[in-house]
Amino acid sequence: MIEPTAGEAPLPSAPQSVSSAPPPSPAEPTEPAEPRDPAPPSVPQARIAHAFSVQLLCRALGMLASVVSVAMTARYLGPDRYGQLMVAVAFIGIWTSMTDLGISTVIVRRVTSGRGELERLVRVNSGLSLVYCLPLGIIAAITGLLIYRDASVRVMLVVLSGQLLMLTMRTRFEPVFLSTVRFSAVAISDLAGRLGTLAMVSWLVTAHADVIWFAVAQLIPPAVQLLIQGTAAAQHISLRPIFALREALDLLRESLPLMGVAVVGIVYWRADGVILSLMSTHAEVGVYGLAYLIAFNTEALSVFFLKSTLSTATELFARDVKAYVVFLRRSVELMYFIAVPVAVVGSMLAVPL
């Protein structure tokens, strides 16, 4: 090796990489990183607004069709026979809380928080729905037959129990629309079902049909919704059922609190109608049924908003609680903005209606 002479720099033994920027001096303080704003939710607010507006528009048109069909049905059947129809509708309605079990919300919560795959969870739920939909309809029909003695009511109870089967199978599609916040198929199916009911009621009135056929007309909305929503959901994922006992039990266990809330809500809405059907005349049940239909259609506004924002709310809660609180506060303010006019106008129209 050649030793360097005085004043000469030593020769490097191998090439070395030299950084172009000098290292920071330890004496110089480093600036703290600025806090970043929370990332926006994956679902744009424009899509949420579109989903809500589409459902609201279709429900407004559907309500017009429902008002006409209800008016035609009530006038044609009269107080007694319309009351018989409402008895069957109210009793079967109290079983509708068992058609969902809160599993749709659990699936959306898992998907948005990254704890599950949408297609797998929906297929497991499809298998579970196939298992319990038939026993649910049979139990509801048998219970109604044991309680009521009117022959027409008993026949309509058996007919309307088929509604539970279709509703159970339809709810398995809901996580697809809730996760993607795409409700065009849901809104269109709701409008198409109501228009179908109006068409059949018009034909029944013209043909002077018996009251039992008006119960058959109540099966048109769930059948149309099952067809349209099933076709739309199948374009996103596979709906072929999977019978996985452990995964299904896991979903049921997580949905127990939601199931309890749903049961309480349905009982709150329906139990008084059932009690009235046992303690009063068919005419009084019919009058109550008309008031109930008006209230139920108004209550649907909050349901539309909940479905449109569920995916965003669950994602924000899993990722940023502060952003979730802000989103929830704005949602409540919007609901107040809608609820106050409804309450004022509703109280003014209560007496004329």
Image (spheres, rainbow, N blue to C red):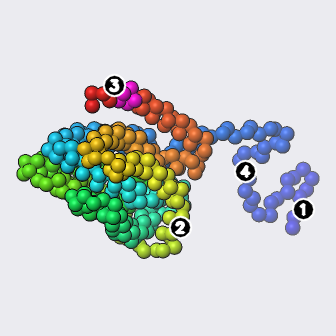
- The residue wearing badge 3 is 348
The reply to whether the C-beta atoms of the residues labelled 3 and 2 are less than 8 Å apart is no
Residue type at the position of mark 1: Glu
The location of residue 86, given as percent across then percent down, is 27, 49
* x then y, percent, for residue 277: 32, 50
State the mark number for residue 3: 1
Crowd around label 1: few <14 · some 14–19 · many ≥20 (10 Å): few
Mark 4 or mark 2: name the one nearer the start of the chain.
4
Q: Quadrant of residue 294?
A: top left
Answer few, some or many: residues within 10 Å of disc 3's Cα (few below 14, many 20 plus, some between 14 and 19). few
Viewer-nearest of labels 4 and 2?
2
Query: Mark 3 or mark 1, which has the lower sequence index?
Result: 1
Helix, strand or loop status at disc 3: helix
Q: In the image, what residue type sits under mark 3?
A: Met
Is the stretch drawn in magenta largely helix, strand or loop? helix
User: Which percent across, then down, holds residue 202?
Assistant: 12, 47
Q: Which residues are magenta?
A: 341-349
Residue furthest out toward the left: 207
Q: Residue at x 80, y 60 (%)?
A: 12
* Quarter of the image with the N terminus in it: bottom right
Q: Could you give the CA–CA distance between mark 1 and mark 4, rounded to whole angstroms?
A: 27 Å
Residue depicted at 78% across the width and 46% down the height: 23
On the rendered structure, is 210 left or right of 311?
left
In whole angstroms, how far apart are the C-alphas of marks 2 and 1? 77 Å
Relative to residue 36, is residue 111 depicted above or below?
below
CA gap between label 4 and label 3 equals 79 Å
Q: Which residue is mark 4?
A: 19
User: Image height check: is 255 above or below 86?
Assistant: below
The secondary element bearing badge 4 is classed as loop
For the C terminus, the image quarter is top left
Residue at numbered disc 2: 250
